[in-house]
Amino acid sequence: MTNPINIKVGSFAASSSPVSTPSSIHDHFRHVRRHEHEHVPRVLHPIDNEDIRVLLLENISLDAVQCLRAKGFHVDHHTRAMSEDDLIQNIGNYHAIGIRSKTKITANVVKAATKLLVIGCFCIGTNQVDLPAAARAGIPVFNSPFSNSRSVAELVMAEVVGLSRQLFERSYELRTGIWNKQSKGCWEVRGKTLGIVGYGHIGSQLSVLAEAFGMRVLFHDIVNIMPLGQARQVDSLATLLAESDFITLHVPELPETTNMISYSEFAKMKKGAYFINNARGKVVDIPALIDALKSGQVAGAAVDVFPFEPAFNGAPFDDQLNAWASILRGMYNVMLTPHIGGSTEEAQRMIGDEVSQAVTRYLGYGSTFGAVNFPEVDLRAITAEQGTHIRVCHVHKNQPGVLKQVNDALSPYNVEKQYSDSKGEVAYLMADIADVSRRDLNHLRDRISGTDANILTRFLI
Ligand code: NAI
């Protein structure tokens, strides 16, 4: 295997005289680089060395395909989703599957997935997967919850300016042949106050962008968060509503956030404030928003997410889906977008990178860091010079006595490092052990995978 760090070490050695004690900052870095190769992670492989086959559905980014192929995996890439029946027929051939939101991994699919080791959701949500069924089968599920934060923050800034300048009304008028140049009721955003509800990944990004526009930023969050720039956390939602010219929501959908903005909250806003929801549809009571828009309490709104959203492009957005849809569609001071807050090429690329790396890390190193349905376990890498170390990855039922059985099996060897954790019914143990012969390895594997709590045992060498 070529090792870029070794190449650098070689080139340093050729161009400089040996340095035993670092004396300048440059010498120090040279010295550090010379010794870096000692800590280069070793690339691990499954003991049975079976070729890993990956099925990617729903037109997952080609960067992800490239990343997985670069690891030596065989990748089948399809542009469309698969039905449950098709999945049941095909999934038995694959060790990993990548999906987006349309492919449903049901308990029946999991049952048919006899070789499946890992599921990558190349999107934000994971409710298309039966997560407990996957966990019980020893299959971790990875997603990419924050890759599109920047995309959402940028859309919100566009909406802040768009609402403030009545862009939608002017554009609509001109499209219908009406020239209506006016400045009345159109404002710069500079010097105005943006109130952010939920100062997480998106809210905090937005805070930075808004300040660059010269806005004053207030935020409300249930936890105390260090503000970025000049932003200020306020003591309550009521304070934020009373002081902001623009109010934007960035909280998750939870029982506590359902309808968190309703009649009384709109009443607390400044008259003529603007309201933006790019979080989740159920966080806002839309009939209350419609009332506030009709009375002029809210001057305009941008809504990207809805309690019920069509399942596919081209499907109608009508009153059958949400009883008030046609009223909202008829209001010109409302910008309506079909849940596109996070939909950019950049976000798709980042999702592709993040999920393919998580899948690769699990297949190659056993790390479940970031898995949504699984205990999160990771170990420091086995380094290149630890040639005889092997890694045991043992998924088991979360029941008493398992660690004793496994540690009995490992006890003849030096356990270099070990970590285990549990989540619900499933527990996961990783251990690196030294100096195990190939013969011992098979025996050890039979012993650990033969325990009654065993779900899946993999050895990486
Ligand atoms: P995050 O988890 O990083 O931040 C959420 C913040 O909300 C946290 O700081 C949390 O403490 C706070 N929070 C929770 N409950 C609260 C409450 N009752 N009152 C005040 N603050 C509360 O989440 P992130 O990534 O910033 O996403 C926020 C929302 O945006 C989520 O609902 C997500 O689903 C949605 N989203 C929408 C997208 C779109 O396309 N429109 C794309 C990506 C995310």
Image (cartoon, rainbow, N blue to C red):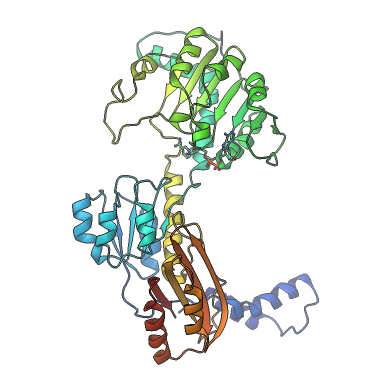
Q: Dividing the image into 4 quarters, which one contains the N terminus?
A: bottom left
* Location of residue 281 with respect to 80 vertically, above or below: above
Residue located 26% across and 56% down the image: 109
Name the residue located 35 percent from the left edge and 20 percent from the top edge.
325
Vertical comparison of 121 with 445: above or below: above
Tell me if 94 is positioned left or right of 366 in this view: left
Horizontal and vertical percent for residue 291?
47, 12
Nearer to me, 274 or 155: 274
- Can the viewer see residue 433? yes
Question: In x, y percent, where is residue 85?
Answer: 19, 53
| Nearest to the observer: residue 249 or residue 188 | 249
Q: Which one is in front, 149 or 105? A: 105
**48 w.r.t. 217: above or below:** below
Q: Is residue 425 left or right of residue 87?
A: right
Q: In this orientation, does residue 361 appear? A: no
Residue nearest the observer in this picture, 339 or 266: 266
Residue drawn at x 70%, y 29% as measured from the top left: 235
In which quadrant is the C terminus drawn?
bottom left
Q: How many marks?
A: 0
Return the x and y of residue 259 as percentages of the image width and height: 49, 26
Quadrant position of residue 444: bottom left
Q: Tell me the residue at 69%/81% (across/down).
A: 16
Spot the residue most to the front.
Answer: 400
| Rendered location of residue 377, percent (x, y) | 52, 65
